[in-house]
Image (cartoon, rainbow, N blue to C red):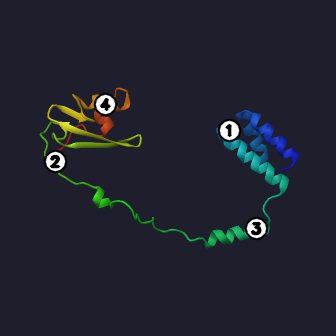
Amino acid sequence: MSVNVAKELAALRKMGLRDLRARYAEAFGETTNANNKPWLVKRIAWRLQALSEGDLSERARRRAAELANEADLRLSPPKVVDGPTLSERTRVASLHVERGDAMPPSGTAIIRQYKGETIRVTVLVDGFEFEGEHYKSLSAVAKAITGQHMNGRAFFGIAKEVAS
C-alpha cells in the first residue's frame, strides 16, 4: 500500500458520516444512503487501494467468471444427518377444552425458546408451575423469566380462545 493510500485511510477513520458519504460518491461515482461508518470506511479504502494498485487483470476477470459458471449449485437443502426428524420433533394431539376457557387443561406443558434456553411451564388446576415455583398467572411466569411485566399469553404464544 502506497504512502498516499495509507494517509487517505487515516483521514477516512477521522471523518464523519456526511464526509464519508461525499467521499464515497467521489470514489464510486454514485451516492449512498449507508449510515454504517465502518462499512463506508472499508468500501472507500478498498476502492482507493484498487485505484492505486490496479484492479484485476482482464485475464483474472475472465477466469473468475469461468469459475462462477462452473460452480456446482445446490438445488436442494442438505439433509440433516444428526438429530431427530421433523416427525419425531412434532407432537400432534387434540385438546378438548371447555368453551370460554382459553387455557390448555391442567398437566399440559407450555414450551418456549427464550434467549437460547428452553422454557417449560406446566399448567396446574390453580395456576402454573415453573422451575419448582407456583405462579397464579401466566403473566407472573413471564415476569419471572424476563424481569418485565408483560402479557403471559402473548409471551407464550397462546391464542385468546381455543376452539373446542
- Mark 2 touches mark 1? (CB < 8 Å): no
Q: Which mark is residue 37?
A: 1
Question: Label 3 to label 2, Cα distance in Å?
Answer: 64 Å
The one of 90 and 83 positioned closer to us in this rendering: 83
**Residue that appears at 17% across and 42% down:** 107
How many C-alpha atoms fall within 10 Å of the one at disc 2: few (<14), some, or many (≥20)?
Answer: few
Question: Label 1 to label 4, Cα distance in Å?
Answer: 38 Å
Residue lying furthest front in this view? 132
Question: Label 2 to label 4, Cα distance in Å?
Answer: 23 Å
**Amino acid at pointer 2:** Leu
**Amino acid at pointer 4:** Asn
Check disc 4 and report the residue beneath it: 151
Residue lying furthest right in this view? 3
Q: Position of residue 6 (x, y in %)?
A: 83, 44
Q: Position of residue 116 (x, y in %)?
A: 41, 43
How many C-alpha atoms fall within 10 Å of the one at disc 3: few (<14), some, or many (≥20)?
Answer: few
**Residue that appears at 84% across and 55% down:** 53
**Amino acid at pointer 3:** Ala
Q: Quadrant of residue 157?
A: top left
Q: Position of residue 113 (x, y in %)?
A: 36, 43
Check disc 3 and report the residue beneath it: 60
Check disc 2 and report the residue beneath it: 95
Q: Secondary structure at mark 1?
A: helix
Question: Label 3 to label 1, Cα distance in Å?
Answer: 31 Å
**Residue that appears at 23% across and 43% down:** 109
Question: Label 4 to label 3, Cα distance in Å?
Answer: 59 Å
Question: Label 2 to label 1, Cα distance in Å?
Answer: 54 Å
Which label's residue is closer to the chain start, 2 or 4?
2
Left or right placement of residue 115 versus residue 49 in this view: left
